[in-house]
Each structure stands twice: as C-alpha cells, then as structure tokens.
Amino acid sequence: MAAGERMARGLAGLDEAAVRGDSGLAGWSRGYAASHVVRSIDAYLWLLAWARDGVQPGPRATGAEIAAAVEAGAGGSGGELAAELRGRLATLEEAVAGMPAERWEFLVSALPGWRHPAWYTVNRCWREIETHHVDLAVGYRPADWSAAYVRWALDDTLAALAAREFPVGEVKATDLGRSWRVDGEGPVVGAPGHVLLAWLSGRGPGENGWPAPPTWPLPPSPGWG
C-alpha cells in the first residue's frame, strides 16, 4: 500500500525526541500515533482471516488489550516503528492477495459492533494510514492526500452524515467536480476536496458558518446490517 510506505518513510527519519514529541492529536505522541496504526492493522488482519476462513481466528483483542499494546509499542524508535509498519503492511498485502474472490463479500464486525464486507476492511486501513500520517505532524498535510483517497473518503463520510441529518444542504468539492446532497435545511459548503475532508475529519478548520462535524469516522451508511 503506497500510503503506508509514505508513512513508513516519514517515521524512519524521526529521532528519539521527535518520536516522543507531540503529534497533532491531543495527548498522543508521534510514537503513540504510529503504534496505533500498527495495532489497527493487526485488527484488520484478524478480520481478513475471519472472512477468508469463515470462522474467527482465535480470541479477538479487547479495546483494553489493544490500548495496552499501543502504549507498549509507542516507545520504539522511528526506525523500529517504520519497520513494524512495513512488516504489517507486507502481511496485509499477502492477506489481500490470498483472499478468494467470493470471500470479499463476507460480513465481519468492527470492534464497536457494526458490520461491513471484508473488502471494506482495506478501505478502513487506507483511511487509518492517511489520517494518522497527517497526525504525525512531520510535513504530510491534507493537501498531500491523493484525489482518489479524497473522493472515496468524502463519498463515505458524506453518506454517513446525510443519514444523520448533518446540517449542511450541499457539499461541493470545487477541484473534483463533485457535489453531495446532505440535508435540505443547511447551507451550501464549497472548497477543494482535501479542505472539506480535513474539516469533516477534524484535521482542519472549517470556514465561518460551517457546522462542527461529529466525531469521525462514522460507521458507513447505509450499512450492511
């Protein structure tokens, strides 16, 4: 996954002080943010194994166990965290390549309980990496997100917001030639796609009059039961 390799390169160049320095998320060091991504990929690998075999591959890590693993991994060096990330991504690529085509529609469950097809796991991982790479605060910005990622993430996010009657009438990505109807009662919001996604994901300010978005990411809507 190209997004993961970009993040790994950013991590590899960090010295000890930078790894322990503040990320863009309150209370998270850069090492903690990187460790969080690594442990999240572990969770995605568990979901893909479940989809491939049709049975859960052993006990699922609880939220508390995941948090403890993230904390334990946060003390690694930039090089160690980059190597961990690359290793997990290589395993993920093997899992994706080895998934029988008919198993991609198998429904798995996110830890909070909402269900989605196995293929959506890969999209979740993509979002995890792109978002937390920005959070590392090492020079990667929302403006660096690819147009393909911004299109997908806006489609996914705005469908979820429309189902929750988010108070915006229409959202227009001025650089992508795309627009989304959200709620008939709110204002029309227009900006480059990465600016919109940064606002909706809590990684950038909205302009005057833009409502505060809910905690992101939201479960997809319509969902899969």
Image (tube, rainbow, N blue to C red):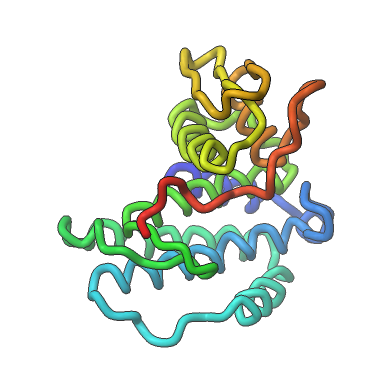
Q: Residue furthest front?
A: 185
**Which is nearer the eye, 117 or 135?**
117
* Residue 223, placed above or below residue 92: above
**Which is nearer the eye, 48 or 20?**
48
Q: Looking at the rendering, in which quadrant would you find the C terminus?
A: bottom left
| Residue 66 picture location, percent across and down | 60, 76
| Residue 157 picture location, percent across and down | 53, 39
Residue name at image x 65 percent, y 19 percent? 189
Number of numbered discs on residues: 0
| Residue 7 picture location, percent across and down | 58, 47
Is 112 situated left or right of 104 in this image?
A: right
Q: Quadrant of residue 92?
A: bottom left
| Residue 198 picture location, percent across and down | 66, 33
Is 223 situated left or right of 187 in this image?
A: left
Is 176 situated left or right of 108 in this image?
A: right
Residue name at image x 66 percent, y 24 percent? 186
Q: Quadrant of residue 36?
A: bottom right
Residue name at image x 54 percent, y 64 percent? 40
Q: Residue furthest bottom?
A: 59
Residue name at image x 40 percent, y 62 percent? 115
Is 96 situated left or right of 17 in this image?
A: left
